[in-house]
Image (tube, rainbow, N blue to C red):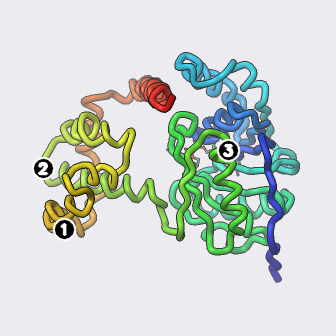
């Protein structure tokens, strides 16, 4: 019979030791976030080639940060990071685990079973999952009270928000400690009050993507013009305020006045938006083609590097605004 651990005694003051499990896109970025804030980081992956390539990935990203005055000496940061392939060796002594394995539920369930068995009851076990709820991969665990989601945005070393999503059995101290850790490493924690698939960010992103698909598939606008509308329109405000503050400032009498003036229009649109758009391969092909006209596949990696440099410039700008 499974017996569940009672209450965790989690106290992390100052930089500790973190295990980053999975050295892909997100794992490498988390390693930078923690090491930049002074944590000792152990990066683990079952794929030895990925593990071997990780130091170069980190060095390239740290160079971008350095060029924008967003980090101290990259060599000092890199020296805080070690690499291991054995999971048990990686996690046995750490304060906090940031799981970054593939987005496959069975893999998460198996990984968290291993992590629960291999770590002390004081270790926080957090998943980077984009959409699974903690209850979906922790229900069976003895230490399920110390498991939760800490969902970043790609790449977390340049985009600070982290969604903290506990399950109903996550110890509130664990939730608070995780949010405190995120704030201490210069991320922006937001905490879900109840579990919901996709959390906040991907639900908001999903609403916009679904509508962008409806507009493109319905022949109302081109892919490029929809992208421009966000890039040179909505997105400009969104880099410093959210949708509620936006509408609060868009009518003389604030949010309530905005709702009076435009609420009916949005409500009418919501009626038309109730049908999900088509995400299957055939329906997506023309949209993929439209993107390839703008950017051939062989230029995607270079454009990702460009995106990261743009994000770094924006982060540096936002940092200056706060001074
Ligand atoms: N890519 C994004 O935009 C993004 C954003 C936020 C969150 N996430 C989430 O972060 C997680 C990782 O995503 P990613 O984009 O870095 O994927 P990725 O495919 O780049 O990396 C996954 C890594 O996990 C490794 N791995 C597989 N099984 C493992 C195991 N049993 N133990 C240790 N390592 C294992 C793989 O070798 C690979 O290197 C996913 O849950 C994803 O949903 C991704």
Residue indicated by mark 3: 22
Task: Point out the image quarter for the N terminus.
Answer: bottom right
| Point 82% across, 73% down: residue | 5
* Mark sitting earlier along the chain (1/2): 2
Mark nearer the viewer, 1 or 3: 1
Mark nearer the viewer, 1 or 2: 1
- 222 with respect to 5 (left or right): left
| Residue 239 horizontal/vertical position (percent) | 38, 39
- In the image, 239 versus 277, the foreground residue is 239
Kindly indicate whether the residue at mark 2 contacts the one at mark 1 (C-beta within 8 angstroms). no
* Mark sitting earlier along the chain (3/2): 3
- In the image, 141 versus 80, the foreground residue is 80
Q: Is residue 222 above or below residue 274?
A: above
- Mark number for residue 179? none
Helix, strand or loop at disc 1?
helix
- Residue farthest along the bottom direction in this orientation: 1
Residue indicated by mark 2: 219
């Amino acid at each position: 019979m499974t017996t569940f651990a009672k209450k965790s005694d989690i106290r992390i003051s100052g930089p500790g030791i973190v295990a980053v499990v999975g050295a892909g896109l997100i794992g490498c970025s988390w390693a930078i976030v923690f090491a930049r804030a002074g944590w000792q980081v152990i990066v683990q992956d079952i794929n030895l080639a990925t593990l071997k390539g990780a130091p170069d990935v980190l060095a390239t990203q740290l160079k971008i940060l350095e060029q924008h005055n967003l980090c101290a000496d990259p060599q000092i940061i890199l020296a805080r990071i070690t690499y291991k392939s054995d999971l048990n060796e990686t996690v046995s002594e750490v304060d906090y685990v940031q799981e970054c394995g593939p987005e496959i539920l069975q893999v998460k369930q198996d990984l968290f079973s291993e992590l629960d068995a291999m770590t002390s009851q004081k270790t926080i076990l957090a998943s980077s999952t984009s959409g699974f709820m903690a209850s979906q991969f922790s229900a069976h665990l003895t230490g399920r009270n110390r498991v939760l989601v800490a969902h970043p945005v790609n790449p977390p070393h340049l985009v600070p928000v982290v969604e903290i999503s506990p399950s109903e059995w996550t110890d509130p101290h664990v939730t608070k400690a995780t949010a405190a850790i995120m704030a201490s490493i210069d991320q922006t924690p937001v905490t879900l009050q109840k579990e919901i698939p996709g959390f906040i960010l991907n639900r908001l992103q999903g609403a916009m993507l679904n509508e962008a698909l409806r507009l493109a598939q319905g022949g109302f606008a081109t892919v490029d013009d929809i992208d421009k509308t966000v890039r040179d329109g909505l997105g400009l405000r969104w880099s410093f305020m959210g949708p509620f503050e936006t509408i609060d400032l868009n009518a003389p009498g604030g949010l309530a006045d905005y709702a009076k003036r435009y609420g009916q229009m949005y409500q009418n649109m919501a009626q038309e938006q109730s049908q999900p758009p088509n995400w299957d391969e055939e329906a997506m092909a023309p949209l993929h083609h439209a993107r390839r006209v703008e950017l051939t596949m062989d230029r995607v990696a270079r454009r990702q590097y460009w995106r990261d440099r743009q994000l770094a410039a924006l982060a540096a700008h936002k940092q200056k605004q706060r001074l």
